[in-house]
Image (tube, rainbow, N blue to C red):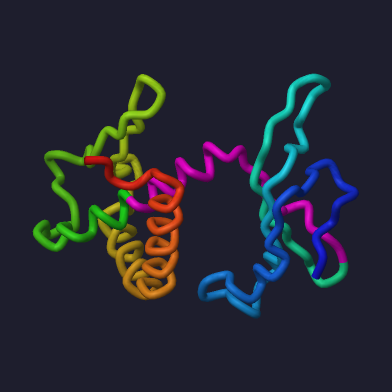
């Protein structure tokens, strides 16, 4: 299905078969496409680019389609990768995290740092972290394939380890 080009987001790069590869929702999703293009919130003389997930209800393009600035897409990828990394050692803790040290990491970005922590404000975090882990395990093959592909592309673009 062709994504719209007449709306405020102006696609430049597109994946119009996303419905076929949408993780465990493949072939049964309303997320029909992904695009990178000119952001819908652009003002005169100020151009931002964004990523967009295009949703189709079966009758029309949905207002629930999401558009994100590219740095936020990458920030989410960083957060996902850090969460995945956390669970490699989480088995050592009865609650899957160290209650005395809920801060997992400070990842330097733009002169400050992204603090990654267990959300202790969530009153159900002890149960929810187990559900989260179970979902990661369930989707391990889907996520691992994407992590591997991302690592390869980043390396090819020159963002691999520099020694």
Give the residue displayed 79% in from the left and 24% down from the top: 43
Q: Is residue 28 left or right of residue 57?
A: left
Q: Quadrant of residue 59?
A: bottom right
Q: Is residue 142 above or below residue 7?
A: below
Q: Residue at x 66, y 72 (%)?
A: 19
In the rendering, at what x and y percent does residue 134 appear? 32, 70
Residue 71 painted magenta: yes
The x, y position of residue 103, in whole percent, is 23, 37
Q: From the image, which quarter does the C terminus lie in?
A: top left
Residue displayed at 74% across by 22% down: 46
User: Among all residues in the image, which is located at the extreme left?
Assistant: 92
Q: Is residue 80 above or below residue 31?
A: above
Q: Which residues are magenta?
A: 60-81
Whether residue 103 is in magenta: the answer is: no
> Which residue occupies the foreground of this view, 153 or 63?
153
Quadrant of the image for the N terminus?
bottom right
């Amino acid at each position: 299905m062709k994504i719209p080009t007449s709306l405020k987001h102006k696609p430049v790069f597109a994946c119009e078969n996303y419905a076929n590869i949408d993780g465990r929702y493949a072939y049964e999703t309303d997320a029909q496409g992904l695009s990178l293009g000119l952001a819908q919130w652009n003002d005169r003389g100020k151009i931002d680019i964004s990523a967009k997930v295009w949703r189709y209800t079966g009758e029309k393009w949905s207002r629930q389609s999401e558009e994100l600035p590219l740095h936020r897409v990458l920030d989410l990828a960083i957060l996902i990768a850090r969460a995945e990394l956390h669970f490699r050692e989480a088995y050592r803790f009865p609650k899957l995290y160290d209650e005395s040290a809920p801060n997992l990491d400070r990842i330097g970005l733009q002169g400050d740092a992204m603090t990654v922590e267990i959300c202790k404000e969530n009153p159900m975090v002890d149960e929810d972290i187990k559900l989260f882990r179970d979902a990661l395990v369930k989707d391990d093959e889907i996520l691992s394939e994407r992590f591997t592909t991302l690592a390869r592309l980043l390396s090819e673009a020159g963002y691999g380890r520099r020694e």
